[in-house]
Each structure stands twice: as C-alpha cells, then as structure tokens.
Amino acid sequence: MESKSFGDEIPLLRLAICLMVGIVVGDFVVPEWRLLLAIFVMMVIVALLLWKHEHWQSVAIAACFGVLGWLLIERQKAALEVVWPKGEVAYEAVVISEPVEKPKTMAVDVLLAQSGRKLKCYLYKDDRSRDLRIGDGLQIQSRIEANSDWRRGSFDYRRYLEIHGFTGRTFVASWKWRKAKVSLAHLLRLERMRLTFLKYRSQLLSRLHSATVADDDAYAVVAAMALGDKSALTQNLKDVYSVTGASHILALSGLHLGIIYTLLSLFVFRRRWQVASQVFIILSVWTFVFLVGMSTSVMRSAMMLSVYALLSLGHRDRMSVNTLAFTAIVMLMISPMALFDVGFQMSYLAVLSILLFIPLMEHVFTAEYLMSHRMVRWLWGMVAVSLSAQIGTAPLIAYYFGRFSCYFLLTNFIVIPAAMLILYLSFIVFLIPSLAYILFNIVAALNSLLAKIAMIPGASIDNLHPTKIQTTMIYMIIVAVYLLAVKLTCIRASARYR
C-alpha cells in the first residue's frame, strides 16, 4: 500500500494556509471586487469539472480558498471605511468596556446605537466618567475622527483598531456628554446578546472587587483569568508576568477553557446521557465565551472543544491538526482581519506546535516506562507541552515584544497548577463571597513568587526585535527541523520491525 505523505494527512491545514495567503495578498493588492468575484466563481466551476482528476481538482480547490480569502479581506476592509463628518455631530452610544484611566482622560469603547459601529471614546477625566459602567447609554456631541496611524516598533495602532472592529475615535469634553436611556433596537441581535453578557460580567467584577481585601494586583489577576477583564492590570504586573513567561495565563485561552470543560465534566452523567451531557457542557462553555467578551483565543478554544465533544460521541480522533485548521478557516471566514491579530497568531501557533511536536517528544521515554512512573509522566508531560508551545510562539514573542523568557519551564510548573486552583476557587467565590480571602491570598502569593523569579539574573533576554524576514526564516528552520525529526522517527520505527 502506498503511504500517505505528511501533507495528505492534513488537507484542512493546506486549505487554511491558502485562505491565509489570499488574505495577506488582499491586504496589499486591492483589485476590483467584481473581477475577484468572477475569478472565484470561475475557479469553483473549474474545481467541479475536474472531479475525475484528483490532483488537479485539489489544486483548483486550493486556488478557490486563496481567492476566497482575497474576497473576504476586501469585504471587511470596505466595511471599515467610513467618512465621518468634519464638524461635531450629536449621536447616541452605549458603553461596551470598562473605563480605563489615562493621564488626562478615561478611555471607553462605545457602540453607536444607530449604525452599530465601534469607537474609541476618550472622556475628560472627572467623577462622572470614572463611574461609567458597561451598558450605560450616552448622548454625545463631538467630532469623530478616523483611526490614528500611530506606530511603535512592530505595533501598528491603526491595524490594531481595525482588527477589533473600531472605525473611529473621539475626544469628548465634560460638558458635551451625559448619561441617557438609549434604544438598542437598531443593533444586531448578536450585539445585543453580547452586551447583555458584558453587563452581567461587569456585575460579577463589581462583586469580586468588593470582596478584595487590599491587594489590587490580586484582584487584577483574578479578573483577567476568571472573567477576561485585563483593564485593572498595571504595567508593572504585566512586566512581571512577561519576564517570567507567565503572560499566557492572563489571557483566556485553551488552558482556561480546558479547565472549565474538565470541571463541568465532573458534574454531569456522561455514561448514561452522553449526548445530553456534551450538549450541556458545550452550551455552558459558549455561555462563558460570551461572558468574557468573545476574544480570539477563547473563540478558537471553544470551537475546538465543540468539535472535540462532537467527535467524542463517535469515538473518533478528537484533537488533531485538521481540527485546528477547521476552526481557523471558520474564524477567518467570519473575520479575515483576525489573521493580523497577535492573539490569533499566538493562539494558533501555540496549539499547532503542541499538536506537531508532542508526538515526537513522546518517543523520548517508552510507553511502558511512563505508565509505571506516574510522576515522571506528569513532569515530562508538562515539559513537553511547555517546550512545544514555546517553539511555536518564541519567534513571534521576540518579533512583537522583543523578549525571550529564560525561565518559562520553571514558571509553567508553578502557574499552570496555580491557574487551575485559581479558576476553581473563583467559581466558588462567586457563589460564596466570604471565601474570597483564600483566593486573593493565593493570588498574592503567586504574584510575589513570580516577582522574585523576575528578579533572578538572566530571567529574560530583551531588545531582540527580529525583522519580518528574520522571523519568517526562523519559522522555516523550525519546519525543516520538524520534518527532519519526523523522517528520523519513521526510519527508527521501521528499523525496529525489521
């Protein structure tokens, strides 16, 4: 029998890459959209006509996905183009984020009640602006400006705003806005539902903050890990987690949803009502996704868990590169601009690297040895996952943040068990607020320990900043080393059976 090549085993990854290439090309080349649509339709027809020629049909399907990515990015860019009036205008908006204090202003994200467009709104700092909460309606009179072209290193602020759906910004004087009851009838039902969940999250955050004893940093970490709100994180705290390589536990991702999925699985009757229990768990997970603001990494994780639950009912291969590629295709079709989001890139590369490198690292110890030494199996599992994720994300971290954390292995042995404990305790505290002091003392101890690790000489290598070409070359080297390792593993495995 002819063995399949590596590429044949992951067809969805190839299609996802073609879609990404089309999106990247479309970001630089802006043709007439009718011409693109005609090319896409023609490629679909060609792919259908080539049903007798499997190889050429695969090429045509790949080309279809490339043109589709081009079409999608053009459509989203056109939707973000808005010509705002030159002078001041009166409008109604609703607050959709917690206020963030700046040196002279309070920054909030607002959603225009009539058009549903998102704005970055900067209100002059006073007691009224400090008291704003998610869901508050505002009547504003101000000048709306296009997104700023501000850049710093590899960070493009305009691109950041476009990725997150912002179409403009406005600076509002204290006397030119007031709270008011705003009708949301013109907004999409999905936006109204998302706003309802965000309002409920704001209430949970208030309840959590009221239970805080004195440590604002402890509250900030719990708010970020349990509810996805990072507005309370100070720059010093972010630096500590960044230097130690623990930033990933502050951003909701597959780790957090995996913990929640495991927790829910303990309380449902999986054997007797397997289908009903999986449906309940997935609905609960997606409820949490809406509650924490539907960030890119959380959406990706929820999609993968949904596919995992579906495949588990049929006892099929659950977590695979194809599953990851499928979620990427779905997310990019919904929002092609997400491809340029740092969170999207880090999330998918981390999981892809884990899925690819973990099978190779499993061959370091024999299965019999690991089964008979549980502690070694747990320790090596932590090392393998941490190393795999670091291989996939280290070049990106160096490119965007100019840093490499040298003690990431040590840190992960601390923060991953701590994350599980903090998440479990957070859910208990929401039910029994009187136990909050236990939670915040644990988080304070974690912050203190990470701060000490950050002070160790050589904790991180800073000021790296490779160029795009250098970063691409690093990933090409990683791919080459991976393919070589796969080849050597296959040769060694075949030698055993001779």
Image (spheres, helix red, strand yellow):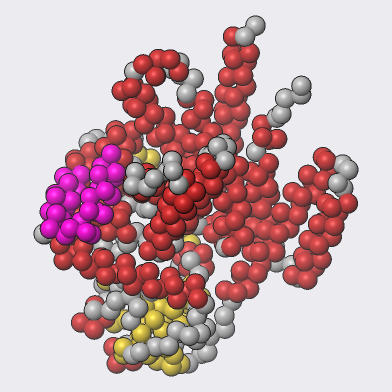
Residue 316 vertical placement versus 481 (above, below): below
Q: Residue furthest top?
A: 498
Q: Position of residue 461 (x, y in %)?
A: 35, 39
Q: Residue furthest front?
A: 272
- Residue nearer the viewer, 147 or 57: 57
Residue at 39% in and 29% down = 381
Q: Position of residue 16 (x, y in %)?
A: 64, 49
Query: Does residue 345 appear to the left or right of 140 in the view shown?
Result: right
Q: Which quadrant holds the N terminus?
A: top right
What range is drawn magenta here?
417-446
Q: Position of residue 155 (x, y in %)?
A: 46, 58
Q: Which quadrant holds the C terminus?
A: top right
Residue at 74% in and 49% down = 62
Q: How many marks?
A: 0
Query: Does residue 13 appear to the left or right of 253 in the view shown?
Result: right
Q: Is residue 425 magenta?
A: yes
Q: Tell me the chief SS of the magenta region.
A: helix
Residue at 84% in and 60% down = 42
Q: Position of residue 407 (x, y in %)?
A: 31, 34
Splitting the image into 4 quarters, where does residue 394 fall? top left
- Residue nearer the viewer, 381 or 246: 381
Residue 422 vertical placement versus 334 (above, below): above
Q: Is residue 411 visible?
A: no
Q: Is residue 314 visible?
A: yes
- Residue nearer the viewer, 394 or 402: 394
Residue at 71% in and 54% down = 65
Residue 321 vertical placement versus 229 (above, below): above
Q: Is residue 254 magenta?
A: no
